[in-house]
Amino acid sequence: MEPQSDAVGAFIPGPRATLEPLGRGVLDGVRLAVKDLFDVAGVPTTCGNPDWARTHPPAVATAPAVVALLQAGAALVGKTKTVELAFGLSGENIWHGTPRNPRAPDRFPGGSSCGSAAAAAAGLADLALGSDTGGSVRIPASYCGLYGIRPTLGAISLAGTMPMAPGLDTPGWFAATIDLFARTGDVLLPGEVGRLDGPLLRLEEAWVNARTDVAGVLSGLLERLAPRLGPALPVSLIPEGIATLYRGYRAIQGQEVWATHGAWIGTATPTFGPGVADRFAAAAKVTAAEAAAGRALRRQLQARLHPLLAGGAVLAYPTSPCAAPLLAATAREQEEVREATVGVTAIAGLAGLPEVTLPVATVAVPGGRAPVGLSLVAGPGRDRALLALARDVAALLGAP
Amino acid sequence: MEPQSDAVGAFIPGPRATLEPLGRGVLDGVRLAVKDLFDVAGVPTTCGNPDWARTHPPAVATAPAVVALLQAGAALVGKTKTVELAFGLSGENIWHGTPRNPRAPDRFPGGSSCGSAAAAAAGLADLALGSDTGGSVRIPASYCGLYGIRPTLGAISLAGTMPMAPGLDTPGWFAATIDLFARTGDVLLPGEVGRLDGPLLRLEEAWVNARTDVAGVLSGLLERLAPRLGPALPVSLIPEGIATLYRGYRAIQGQEVWATHGAWIGTATPTFGPGVADRFAAAAKVTAAEAAAGRALRRQLQARLHPLLAGGAVLAYPTSPCAAPLLAATAREQEEVREATVGVTAIAGLAGLPEVTLPVATVAVPGGRAPVGLSLVAGPGRDRALLALARDVAALLGAP
């Protein structure tokens, strides 16, 4: 399959890594883009940073998740840009260039799986593989108007991918249409489909955390889900507060990131873009006590959410508290967005729950409208039932 | 065992029905009082109404629930007063006399299992059997400062008892101490004990429905359960409103009550006390459409609560919205209390869930203090786990 043009700068610059399908199946004819954090045999895995590429040999094997998609009929059309070492949510990459957000060109695409989101949103790929530690699929999906999934922690192999924070890392994927999005779960996710019948729990802390316009438009949509899931029931499940979740997440992630990459950073002395460099510096300073407190919080959150979702209940909330920030946003504005955003993405992240974001709304921004996603979160292991529910919800809401 | 005096008027007037134990077991030495809705072989079951007693022969067999308690070592010390045909929550009985509330002598004892509650609260019995259709164990337990349980619908046989509204009726029991209260579940309830670990869900509609003083004192206690169940999480699960639950409950109950007793009332033309007569008259007027709407609401409530509680979550709320009404309360005041009360007791009632009320608080009333109970509600069939949890909660709160 011949690579197409790259009008939005989604792909890694240079020769395009492509692969023909390895079989025929439910993904026949699907153009697949893969975040450059997944290994493709014979190709460098840059992880978005030139020093990483310089100090690591080309991959010797293709990541099993990629192989599974190729075996199901997909063709690889290229490897996509990522925030350096996946450490950032805006989608900025000073080395490869920040991909354009096809749905809001003066705004960030979201990251770290920025190139995968841009490729899917621009129609340069039908299906795009990404990874999600603290929102790296969910946030760009929300910003670019795509379906996106963070699966149950551990449900899909991360072999052949760059680890970031292994206790939080998952793969994930993007698509512009629900049919392909849900069908991809048949390829990658194990087990029975099952069914989620609710109740639909409106997690109040996440709605209050969102901007009024985002909460307003998405809240109105919840009412239309009543025929499938019953009325949306307001619940408050995070008495610690979203800011506490952010701090807990940040401590666990920081400790794990430094355990994963600290030695390489010390040896290779890589150069990072400014935001990424700051985040690694902060990761190095996380104390054992902070990480232990984060893990205690994580256990509490799991002990609370897992039993509550065991019977088929579904949490609903805005995926991101706001539409994509402007490319012109200051570092301080970006940091404020990041804290509010990660406080909510940390719910499923810390609890290890599957989360699907659906491109069902837009909000007014200067010069037009920008997408925001609605997230549905289910109990651990209910990924395929969640994708089946997403089909029904998309139909009820008239989404693509 | 010689019957004791009856200082609070708990027992049916006349010769006391007593039985020696039928075996030895965990209830050795326990004095048992039984609501006069349960058959004891050879004794009339008055159901609190002289016309009922006049038109029904003495029982030919003892109710299996009573037999089970006797076989476990308990001795029957008497049959206790009930609101006529169990149709009322105040505990009033104009024929047999209203039992006194030992904990608040100028107030109602609560009903319909008024005599059982009075006997247990006055120390005339250690364990008292009652029945609960719309709160007839839970409310007198709350008013008299006792432990009380409404088990999962259908968990314990109602053979040998007067049916009232068969789709809502359950037996239940009272005790003044948690140990005997929980131990009785080992005798009457089938299945494994299991364990409930939360989360603890603070059902907001029921708290808002309670008087400020009741909500205040019980709310403070919830915080002390955190070591066992985690923080109390505010949830709103009744978007229809408590008043709608009351109406739905009333329609189902009315239709079933009339189906059960309408023919006898037409034939025997019994005389009822004024409140009871009014309630039967209202039951006769329930339309099929009202009952169908109540049943639809019931199914929605079950579809919502059963999955939410499947994993071990527990609902918490005030058992009664206020302490026992004054004996001097007007009929209108009593009716207002009834509506607010039944709107909440209907939650477990309609959903078929086990509910335990714990005597953990009192509120100030003119001349002293009166008891109010804290209810814990679990998923269907989790009765023994709920009783085990009640043990832990009682210990945490320093309850008897």
Image (cartoon, coloured by chain):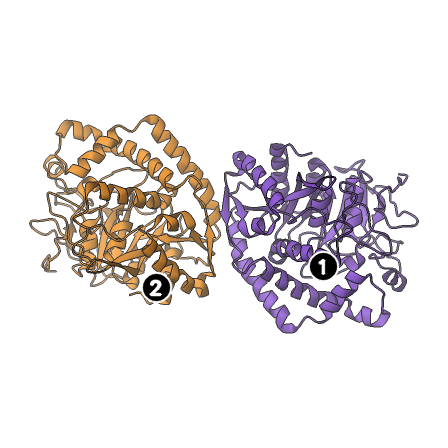
Chain colours: A orange, B purple
Question: In the visual, does A201 lie left or right of B268?
Answer: left
Kind of residue sitting beneath label 1? Arg
Asked if one can make out residue A88 in the rendered structure from this viewpoint, the answer is no
Residue at 87% x, 53% y: name it. Answer: B96
Question: In the visual, does B165 lie left or right of B233?
Answer: right
Kind of residue sitting beneath label 2? Ala
Give residue B391's position: percent from left, percent from top: 64, 36
Residue at 31% x, 52% y: name it. Answer: A149
Question: Which chain letter matches label 1?
Answer: B
Q: SS of the residue at dot 1?
A: helix
Quadrant of the drawing holding the N terminus of chain B? top right
Give residue A347's position: percent from left, percent from top: 37, 44
In the picture, the disc for residue A394 is 2
Mark 2: few, some, or many residues within 10 Å (few <14, many ≥20)? some
Quadrant of the drawing holding the C terminus of chain B? top right
Nearer to us in this view, B369 or A359:
B369
Give residue A11's position: percent from left, percent from top: 13, 51
